[in-house]
Amino acid sequence: MPVPADLEDLLLRCRRREPAAQRALYARYAGQMLGVARRYTRTVPEAEDILQDAFVKVFTYLDDFRAQGSLEGWIRRIVVTTAITYWQSGKMRRQQVVLDEVVEPIAPDADVLDRLTVAEVLKLVEQLPDGCRLVLMLYAVDGYTHGEISELLGIQESTSKAQLSRARKQLNVLHQRQANFIRHD
């Protein structure tokens, strides 16, 4: 996919380490990539740290970008792998992962989450244990396969599938608890 001329010029200037060009490239993608980083963290400051480190990598490895895909996709992958590296290194504030026995929803209804707003779903997702949340985001939002997730996280493919299943069940349970709480107020 050809890179637009204005972006090609900006990349050329970034490769020459021109600070103004680097600021312009950062400004062009930072907002969107902060959103990507935020999906993998519990706090905005953690996402901002990941974003900064990811852009250092972008500028360091910009010569490796071959325009075989979109620049946005290439940067997104760097942000995601930086977030995973942070998580694996323990730099993120980790929630104690104690998976309660996940109770099957009272009425297994696959459409329950479809009726929620994006903000409501994200609020529920933030309550998931780290492993479940990471696999859910990688699989359902960023489109990674279980094989790719297993490589990224250093886990078995079956573990990725189990974490995704737990995440879905836990989301239903969390939603039911929230709905019951609201009804009883």
Image (tube, rainbow, N blue to C red):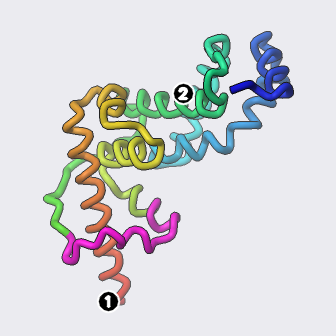
How far is mark 2 from mark 1, CA to CA? 45 Å
Front residue of 118 and 68: 68
Mark 2 and mark 1 residues within 8 Å of each other at the beta carbon:
no
Front residue of 110 and 99: 110
- Please, is residue 171 above or below residue 181 in the view? above
SS of the residue at dot 1? helix
For the N terminus, the quadrant is top right
Q: How many marks?
A: 2
Q: For the point 55% across and 43% down, which residue is it?
A: 36
Place of residue 166 in the rendered image (x, y in percent of width and height, measured from the top left): 23, 53
- Please, is residue 94 above or below residue 179 in the view? above
Q: Is residue 23 visible?
A: no
Front residue of 122 and 143: 143
Residue at image mark 2: 78
* Amino acid of disc 1: His
The disc, 2 or 1, on the residue closer to the chain's N-terminal end is: 2
Residue at image mark 1: 184
Magenta segment: 105-122
* Amino acid of disc 2: Ile
